[in-house]
Amino acid sequence: MSYTVRIKEEIATIKCTKSEMIAELSGFIRNNGTYSDNTIILTTESETTKNRIIEFLKDSYEVESIVEIKDSLNFSKKDLYVININDKVDLILKDIGFLDEGGELLDMPPTYIVGANEEIRAYLRGVFLSSGSINDPKTSRYHMELLVFSPEEAVFVQKLLNIFDLNAKILNREKGYMIYIKEAEKISDFIKILGANNAVLYFENVRIYRHQKNKANRLNNCEQANMDKVFATAQDQLNQIEIIEKTGSKELLDEKTQIALEYRKKYPESSLQELAEIISVETNKPLTKSGLNHRLRKIKELANKLKKQDNK
């Protein structure tokens, strides 16, 4: 079972008030149904969604729906439930804000359909049950989308989403308009708005795990880069020491710098801080990282002078 299906199965069990039922039916029918010859035709692959829509129609309008089962055309191997509504069609379409009182199609539902936050949530549930999907958070990218037919509906749904500060965007697609959210936290908030609490817990657990794992990987990469830098710097210093020793020029360095030279040879993989601490402990003479760096610069300067003389 996909993550989207799990969410839809969960929200299909949410209990609603009469006004919430009408708002959810509005969101579903406006973005799913076709209307012709005084018949509303709705489709879904989800049995629980089918049962929910039938129940809402019966409770709200005392309408019995006719259900056909057809083979799905999208190769999902699931049956397609086709819900036919032949009774009180005009009443239903006007009540859910699909038609106005004169029977004309409305570009968007009247404000009373989504007059309160709970009704907005219900409308968004209807849209999601109709045409929504959310990637499983285990996948490589976070993505939520709702597909709608008209530009007016797309803008309307976007505004409803952004009432909750979800930063929803719209893309024009070949078969309609896609309202989408990419940010993980915003998607989690959207699932909360739908009322799918178990799906939220799953999403958050996976999101936190991925965040911690990515953080650990970044730290490991940073640590590796630092180690590579330490090794490269130490190797440069060893090369400088080799030039000094091959030319018998070690005595040109002061005593403290000669000690630093010997310790670098003895501990070639130590960082500057580690080497300073080792010298401090073993010689019983405190040495800071800055002090050690000053001595190593003297070694570098001498090595560079010797190279220049050798190249003349």
Image (tube, grey):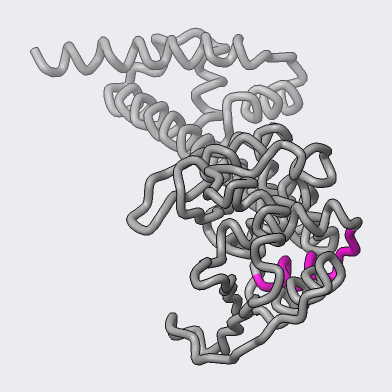
Pinpoint residue 133: horizontal percent, then vertical percent. 59, 62
Residue reaching furthest to the left: 312
Identity of the residue drawn at 66% across and 49% down? 97
Closer to us: 283 or 32: 32
| Residue ID at (89%, 59%) | 16
Q: Position of residue 13 (x, y in %)?
A: 85, 70
Q: Position of residue 25 (x, y in %)?
A: 72, 60
In the image, taking residue 126 as reference, residue 265 lies left or right, namely left
Q: In this picture, is 169 found above or below 101?
A: above
The single residue placed furthest to the front in the displayed view is: 102
Q: Is residue 183 magenta?
A: no
Along the line of sight, the residue nearer the viewer: 15 or 26: 26
161 or 285: which is nearer to us? Answer: 161
Residue 7 magenta-drawn? yes
- Residue at 57% x, 45% y: name it: 181
Q: Quadrant of the C terminus?
A: top left
Please name whichever residue, 18 or 267, is drawn nearer the observer in this view of the structure.
18
Quadrant of the snapshot with the N terminus: bottom right
- Give the magenta range: 5-16
Q: Is residue 248 left or right of residue 166?
A: left
Relative to residue 263, is residue 13 depicted above or below?
below
